[in-house]
Image (cartoon, rainbow, N blue to C red):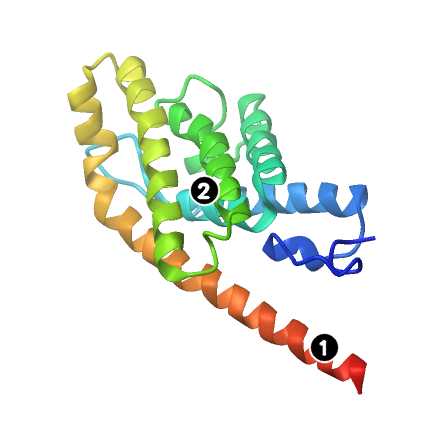
Amino acid sequence: MTSLALGRPRIYLTDGLQGTLVRDSALVLGGAAVITLSALIIVPLPFTPVPITLATLGVMATGAALGPARGVLSALVYLLAGAVGAPIFSNGQSGVLLPTFGYIVGYVVAAFIAGQLARRRADRKPIPTFGLAVLSTLVLYVCGAPWLAFSLGIDLPQAVMLGVVPFLVGDALKALALTLVLPSAWAWMTRLEKRRTADERE
């Protein structure tokens, strides 16, 4: 039985879906698909090997909607599939030697953080949701920039100029988008459940 069936409150947006292991497996694969699709939507930049993608937004949304365990598994499925050769990283790339692989490792950590904060209801109000997005994005920078420096044979300040600074404005916009989407989804879900409860009582 689901937590809703037992009368306990919903923790994550996807908790309303029925099932146990089958549901969780489908959600993990669905989360990996969301990350994959968002990573393939890119805008290449001529001065850096790091493209603009929607993967940051996809990872944060997946972690928050699925929770830390399923969010991490989704990011791991994506990482492992690309690491062994599936052309699902940005620009249809794969493998672990890419300059951007540090960011992909960061997806796993960011999904965990987004899920943990969602567990504490940080995805239900705009300001906490924005904080969730900022913290998750910072984790991606922390994981991605050092690997970028190592991969390109440059120092860390140069890596920050190539892999962080050009993306600050875009990532801020993604954080704002998440701030609009997640609380709105919760508000819609709450109204739907209240309507359903009222209908069942009639």
Indicate the quadrant containing the C terminus: top left, top right, bottom left or bottom right: bottom right
- Asked if labels 1 and 2 touch by Cβ distance under 8 angstroms, the answer is no
Provide the residue designation for mark 2: 39
Q: Residue at x 24, y 34 (%)?
A: 164
Image quarter of residue 104: top left
Q: Residue 119: image x %, image y %?
A: 55, 46
In the image, residue 122 above or below residue 138: below
Nearer the observer, 108 or 48? 108
Provide the residue designation for mark 1: 196
Viewer-nearest of discs 2 and 1? 1
Q: Residue 77: image x %, image y %?
A: 61, 32
For residue 182, side relative to residue 141 (left or right): right
Q: Residue at x 72, y 43 (%)?
A: 24
In the image, residue 152 above or below residue 141: above
Element class at badge 1: helix
Disc sitting over residue 84 in the figure: none
For residue 201, side relative to residue 74 (left or right): right
For residue 149, side relative to residue 79 (left or right): left
Other-residue count near label 1 (Cα within 10 Å), few / some / many at <14 / 14–19 / ≥20: few
Residue 42 showing in the rendered view? no
Element class at badge 2: helix
For residue 78, side relative to residue 140 (left or right): right
Q: Residue 108: image x %, image y %?
A: 50, 31
Q: Residue at x 35, y 48 (%)?
A: 131
In the image, residue 25 above or below residue 142: below
Q: Amino acid at mark 1?
A: Arg
The span from disc 2 to disc 1 (Cα, nearest Å) is: 36 Å
